Image: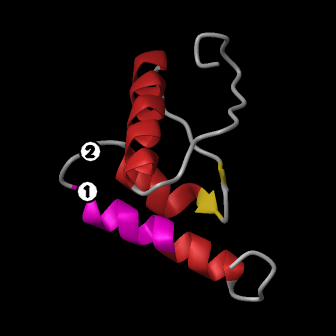
Amino acid sequence: MCGTASAPYLATRCLQQLAEDESKNFSLAPEALANTFYVDDALCGTNTLEDVLNLQQELIALLGRGGFHLRKCCASHPNIL
């Protein structure tokens, strides 16, 4: 799939389907997964540190169910890293 013209679309589509399939099992991650990812990058956040830590844990668990991994993270608060 990598290196083909359709690779960005296919990667995004897989993440959107995963978010749809798992929307009943997670409260925060499906929306972030469906709306903030492009290929393998996301830009998302929340209003509180507690919510962002919950979102981070949900994304790790949800991506793991789909065979994906959260490999890098940038944040403005050290507790998130």
Picture coordinates of residue 6 (x, y %)?
69, 87
Q: Which residue in the rendered view is the most extreme toward the bottom?
A: 5
Q: Position of residue 61 (x, y in %)?
A: 39, 39
State the predominant SS element of the stretch in magenta. Answer: helix
Residue depicted at 77% across the width and 86% down the height: 4
Q: Which residues are magenta?
A: 14-23
Residue bearing mark 2: 26
Q: Are marks 2 and 1 in contact (CB under 8 Å)?
A: yes
Q: Measured along the vertical axis of the image, is residue 71 above or below residue 67?
A: above
On screen, residue 71 above or below 34? above
Question: Mark 1 — residue?
Answer: 23
The residue sitting at 59% across, 10% down in the picture is 79
Q: Quadrant of residue 22?
A: bottom left
Side of 48 where 78 appears, left or right: right
Element at label 1? loop
Q: Nearer the viewer, residue 55 or 66?
A: 66
- Separation (CA) of disc 2 from disc 1: 6 Å
Furthest residue toward top: 79
